[in-house]
Amino acid sequence: MVHFTIDGREIEAEKGENLLKVAKQNGFDIPNLCWMEHMLPTGSCRMCLVKVEGQRGLKTSCTLQVEEGMNVTAFDDEIEGVRRTNLEFILSDHNYDCSICQQSGECELQDVAYKYQLGSEEIKKLNYLTEKPELESDYTSPVLNYEPDKCIKCGRCITACNIVQGKRVLSFVERGFFMYPSPDFVKWGDSTCDGCGECVQSCPTGALVEKPLVSMIRAMDIDKKVKTTCTYCGVGCQVEMWVKDEKVVRVRGVNAKPNNGRLCVKGRFGYEFITNKDRLTTPLIRKNGVLEEASWDEALDLIAEKMTGIRDTHGSDALAGLASARCTNEDNYIFQKFFRASLGTNNVDHCARLCHAPTVAGLGKAFGSGAMTNPVEEFADADCILITGTNATETHPVTGTYIRNAAAKGAKILVIDPRKIDIVDDSYLWMRQKSGTDVAWINGMINVIITEGYANESFIKERTEGFEELKKAVASYTPEKVEEITGIKADDLREAARVYATSEKSSIVYAMGITQHVTGTDNVLSLANLAMVTGQIGRASTGVNPLRGQNNVQGACDFGGLPNVYSGYQKVTDPAVKEKFQKAWGVDSLSPKDGLTIVEIMNEAAKGNLKGLYVMGENPMLSDPNLNHVKEALEKLDFLVVQDIFLTETTEFADVVLPASSAAEKEGTFTNSDRAVLRVRPALPAPGNSRGDWEIMCDLSTRTGYPMSYTDSNAVMEEIAELTPIYGGISYERLENEHLAWPCPTTEHKGTTFLHAKKFSRGLGLFTPVDFIPPAEQPNKEFPFILTTGRMLFHYHTATMTRRSAPLREFAPEGYLEICREDLIDLGAADGDKLQISSRRGVITAKAKMSDRVAKGVIFIPFHFSESPVNALTNDVLDPQSKIPELKVAACKVELIKTTANES
Ligand code: SF4
Ligand code: SF4
């Protein structure tokens, strides 16, 4: 700590801290327009000037660090006079009428001008200073407007884009009064800007503003601002929703963990679906093949009668439920409680099965916990990040910003991915492996680490077991052998192994490119082996970090949306656990056996063994593999209920459809990818007669003879905390002020930032030797291409919400097939041509998108688009350990069916 004075007052602060920040924290309202916390200062606005005893002239306080004994003058007549003059210069270049500006009321420039009482009359006198440039406003972006008349050239937008988000889209062009920020030197709409809006949020004036509802966003007209959690990916960004006339009109990032103000284009601009006219507002019952409006009593009585009828005639296990990674923790807890306590079955699963079931199985086996080990912000301080099987900058965009921040600070980014994803531009080394060969290259890295003496022997000895078996298993995976299997050059593999092992803090980041394979669990176990052999776990900015896909996929797993566990991963087969839940839930007997997983549920339905299915907030007719098989299964059911916010591909098969609330209308919690429990708060009332998911389940349960009722979602969380040791210390009250990540077993516990610090959850970390097994399908003469699937930045899951948000639609209106130039030429096709893609399971069409992201013989299709439903092609063969299907590898045929020339 250092001690110094500001205007004679004694101040204590951490050595090296930013002077302007410390002054503000201590109540000195020094004006500033260009400074942003956490960023390197530019000192360009020259409003934060101060005097420092012993130093010549006035200094910008944003560029100074506090030092022991310094005497600072923040306010005197001379300083205020210079500030006023500087402000006059700034305002002389600001030709706008505040009364019609969208930013009026929260404009930092307006606030400072008001403070110094500088109005338009004074400013007009300065017009002789400027040769007024004629700069055009730019309205070409789907998400933002730029009006140069309001721009003060502070450069904050450029810092926000390039340093905070790491996008490198913006820079100044021209000089002096003619200078302005430009995206790639072109119009916004033609640039590589991806619409994250970080620049807009950082702009201290109204020069950059959100476009979608531009006439409704003035701060002074807003009815309320609600702090809640983004409803899209698993990062769990904290957002502030601005509400006017019962509509969300603006979304801003909150300066709190995990996003620290940052958002991506979906979080900031994907809110239009909330009040979309297609929202379901009343229950629907199918009569004579048509869904007709019904009352809640009619619909719930019918469901209760049918579900109990199936249970009583065919047994409890003839029923199944799909919980939801989009719904809250409270919704999922009540959903599985209804299935287990009222209907008597453990047939509860959800789409985590299709993304991170191998993570739960693999990391559970290796470490004793299947969750992400470290928080996403810690990536920014890593020295090396090994990224494999995740296109993080698109799928988890705010996580991607922290990775880019690390790269900018000099961290070595190792990318191992079959596609040349965007983060490759920031990488130290990119290795393109053949799809489905991950065990081989990971074993190869471990082989190099052991043979070259980089293994962390003390860590292995003190913290792990099973090393000798692992050593034997990887001995044959020499870099040369790995090159033959994977296509990765032997020397690149050696270099990657050395960098990962010898960096001070190395972190592994992965997602579905690792898990969605028949060897998904083996892949995860191999990554765990790699981390343990080097001791790169149990410290900040290290660990094995599975990025969870949907907003609450972690929570849906945590709360028993899985067929083998109750909340908190307590096994249904453990007699003591079973007894505990029987007692707490007041039932005589709970099922003692594991239930069915998603693909097994569909298989049993197709065979006619499973009769009734309840789907809460999922869309298996687009998200599950081998869609023709899913269709066959859904058609075979006696009774299907879908509870959702829109009609979907799955509701086409439903007997009853129930209208649910969206996250913007709910009270509750989500648990993000890094185990933090985050509050969800209602910004709007639920539309029409729609209701919250857990409230619907309670009402239904009561009608099936197992009454459930809670005063509010807080009461549900209280029951959860009582029954779930890892959530024992979580309460809404604490979440108001604390950022808590589980395990948080008691009310005194502060939560767990990173896992496995002193010992693994299972005690010793377990090495598991694994051998390479090729993917289930290999290309052949008939199906010569390898198809891989995934997400894209602008859409979320089956796109029911994102395609109902105009800016996201404008960025990405339709599905496509990524294919390399050489393959397109071989097919006699060109960019934009319509292609037919077929596998052993189905046929779809999509437009060709020529791209160097994929290698020859490989195609990529995003899974969001119903008109190009790639899951009609994917393979539902399962990983035997976790039962995840091999969504990432399918052998395909591609044919030209229409050229763009024909079309025109
Ligand atoms: S919206 Fe995002 S990517 Fe586009 S210019 Fe602004 S900060 Fe950069
Ligand atoms: S990164 Fe994920 S959580 Fe954050 S704003 Fe984007 S979609 Fe929402």
Image (tube, helix red, strand yellow):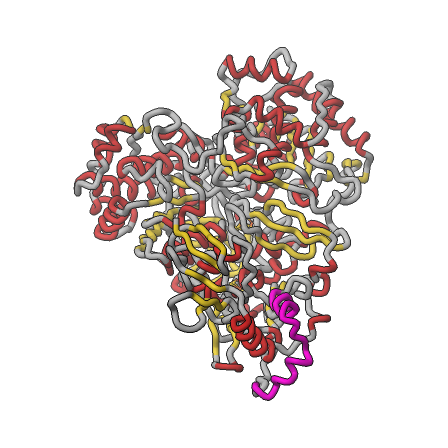
Residue 473, image x and y in percent?
A: 24, 33
Residue at the far left in the pictured view: 452
x, y percent for residue 466: 27, 27
Task: In the displayed orientation, state which residue is furthest to the top.
Answer: 588
Does residue 817 lie above or below 46 as drawn?
A: above
Could you tell me if residue 504 is visible in this image?
A: yes
Identify the residue at image location x=74%, y=37%: 691
Query: Dominant secondary structure of the magenta stretch?
Result: helix
Nearer to the camera, 607 or 92: 92
Residues rendered magenta in the picture: 108-130
702 to the left or right of 546: right
Horizontal side, residue 253 vs residue 886: left or right:
right
Residue that appears at 49% across and 33% down: 750
In the picture, measured across the screen, residue 643 lies left or right of residue 253, that is: right
| Residue 474 lies in the magenta-colored region | no
Q: Is residue 304 left or right of residue 760?
A: right
For the point 39% across and 51% down, the residue is 2
Position above or below: 274 against 575: below
Count of all numbered marks drawn on residues in the image: 0
**Quarter occupied by residue 519:** top left
